[in-house]
Amino acid sequence: MIKAAKHKEEITMRLMNKVAIVTGGASGMGEAICRKFAKEGAKVVVADYNFEGALKVANEINAEILDAATAIKTDVSVETDINAMIDTAITLYGKLDILVNNAGIMDGFEPVGEVSNDRWEKVFAVNVNGAMYASRKAIAHFLEQGGGSIINIASIGGLQGGRAGAAYVASKHAVIGLSKNTAFMYAKKGIRCNVIAPGAVATNIAQSMGDISTFGQQTTGVGMAINPAFGTPAQIASVAVFLASDHANFVNGAVVTADGGWTSY
């Protein structure tokens, strides 16, 4: 049995007076990032399609750190929702410093010969369009204020070909390409854009899979045997804190692989 690596939390207030939006903030890595950002001094907008879950996370954060979090219902595949999310953050807190595009869904391991138009379009709508809509809206504000940081949560599936089905793998490759282009285009404007590429992390993303391709799952599953460890959402959140902080002010266009060494084989 593969065990999650141990992780000791350290609080250093690296995000004091920062304002952050985290999509997919109601659970998994997004929830952990929201909680960690708040503990590091940031004001956090917990954005999620699951508003009840987002509100629960925000309320629990506020019970520990007064007025540190706000919940907002957001479907990242809908541009008007994205615009409202960012406008709300700026209205509430007067600015936006950090955008974390974390919301994402999985496919059903379908190879290209099996993937439906509906599956392809749905995965891209959330994983790629959502990140683009939010980045485009945030960039306009970052240009006005003279800087900002975008962190896109991709996957090792965006670095290799066999970690999921065609739709998910292609979408995460697209997120990495979008991130690198954004980083270079706006580097001289004080805007950074980086990527975290997690390996196997304990989240609820499997709930979005629906019908699963038997062939695809069996074919991609061979790599699980060499996975040295499952990560925790808190470990990914620690990487996000670093990338969002001034400690990473010369890190731009980077893809930080956080997979416990899985892709090193």
Image (cartoon, rainbow, N blue to C red):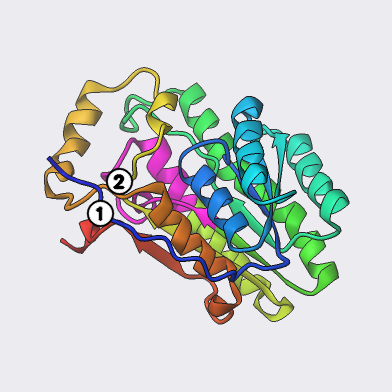
Q: What amino acid is labelled 2 in the image?
A: Ala
- Camera-side residue of 157 and 97: 97
Question: What residue is at 41 percent from the left and 65 percent from the top?
Answer: 256
Left or right of residue 64, residue 164 in this image: left
Q: Residues within 10 Å of mark 1 (few under 14, many from 20)?
A: few
Position of residue 206 relative to residue 137, above or below, is above
Question: What residue is at 82 percent from the left and 55 percent from the top?
Answer: 93
Q: How many numbered circles does the render carry? A: 2
Quarter in which the N terminus is drawn: top left
> Which numbered disc covers residue 5?
1
The reply to whether the magenta stretch includes residue 158 is yes
The reply to whether the magenta stretch includes residue 150 is no
Q: Secondary structure at mark 2?
A: loop
- Camera-side residue of 196 and 78: 196
Left or right of residue 23, residue 2 in this image: left
Q: Residues within 10 Å of mark 2 (few under 14, many from 20)?
A: many
Left or right of residue 1, residue 144 in this image: right
Range of magenta residues: 152-174
Residue identified by numbered label 2: 200
Q: Secondary structure at mark 1?
A: loop
Q: What amino acid is labelled 1 in the image?
A: Ala
Quarter in which the C terminus is drawn: bottom left
Residue 11 locus on image (x, y percent): 51, 66
Front disc: 1 or 2: 1
Residue 74 locus on image (x, y percent): 69, 34
Position of residue 216 relative to residue 181, above or below, is above
Residue 41 locus on image (x, y percent): 65, 63
Residue 55 locus on image (x, y percent): 66, 32
**Mark earlier in primary sequence (1, 2):** 1
> Which numbered disc covers residue 27?
none
Residue that protrudes farthest toward the top in the picture: 211
